[in-house]
Amino acid sequence: MKKVGFIGLGIMGGPMAENLLNGGADLTICDLNRAIVEKFVAAGAKQASAAEIGATCDVIFTILPNGSIVQDILFGEHGVASTIRPGTVVCDCSSVTPQESQTCFAKFKAMGVGFVDAPVSGGEPKAIDGTLAFMAGGEQADFDALKPFFDHMGASAMLVGASGSGSVTKLANQVIVNLNIAAVSEAFVLAAKAGVDPRKVYQAIRGGLAGSVILDAKLPKIVARDFKPGGTITVNHKDIKNVLATAHAIDVPLPLTAQLFEIMQSLKVSGHMGDDHCGLIRYFEQLANITVQSGKQD
């Protein structure tokens, strides 16, 4: 049985690692959160440092807040690469830039180590129930080695192309997801300001062309004023910043995404970055002086 390392047990990584453990993986974990580490150890996982995981594991997953943390965990003084063995496959599920993924690929390639960038879509609910979508970039043999583990954590996994392709796909995904949330927010602020119950508007339109996974996932949370994060505005703000940096580097104008970034900036100033990304509606509510709640308009 292959030994699996997992580094990063946050909102997404925790449930992903739990699904691997429940699937019978010989799992070694690493995280700064002592409580979550103790929970996994009690469930049968082993605890180790990043360097120890590099030395002992055949397959290593990381899912971390940003690219600089990924680089430090993998290539820092006491990182995974300091002890890693040729033939190991590393999979980064973090949302980072394509350039950062390609840097990891090149460094590991020189060591005889496989590297796949495989960010995920689906948020916390799909991480919990094991139905995430993995979008991967890298070499076929490395993807094939990871596929059995993807199957424990997700409903789909696709090798999109060469190194960095998974990260490009994730950036495109984040544009679509976040702009959809912004569109839902703007539309339902309009409905609420006009005095119509947003929940009834939702029921009326969800079966038509305006219906979507985003609408079904986020509108009920909005009207319930439930901003507990499945994916924070902070994380999505970072992703949209990466989108714009990547687009500018290849001369792709993204006017709608640029406006979305500024909306997120305003929510940063007002202290809402820890909200679920459906909290984007707070920006539009403030503009219109209205709160979107079922049966109540302020």
Image (cartoon, rainbow, N blue to C red):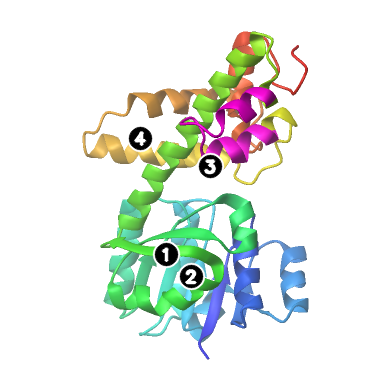
* Residue 78 seen by the camera: no
- Disc 2 marks a residue whose amino acid type is Phe
Magenta span of residues: 200-221
Where does label 4 land, which residue? Answer: 244
How far across and down, in percent of the image, does residue 264 sit? 53, 28
Residue drawn where x is 53% and y is 42% of the image: 213
Where does label 1 land, which residue? Answer: 157
Q: Quadrant of the C terminus?
A: top right
Residue 150 - label: 2
- Disc 4 marks a residue whose amino acid type is Leu
- The front one of 202 and 298 is 202
- Disc 1 marks a residue whose amino acid type is Ala
Where does label 3 land, which residue? Answer: 213
Determine the CA span between mark 2 and mark 1.
7 Å
Pick whichever of labels 4 and 3 is earlier in the sequence: 3
At mark 4, the secondary structure is helix
Q: State the image quarter where residue 286 is shown.
A: top right
Marks 2 and 1 close (CB-CB < 8 Å): yes
Q: Mark 2 or mark 4, which is nearer to you?
A: 2
Pick whichever of labels 2 and 1 is earlier in the sequence: 2
Instruction: Assign the magenta stretch its main secondary structure.
Output: helix
At mark 1, the secondary structure is strand
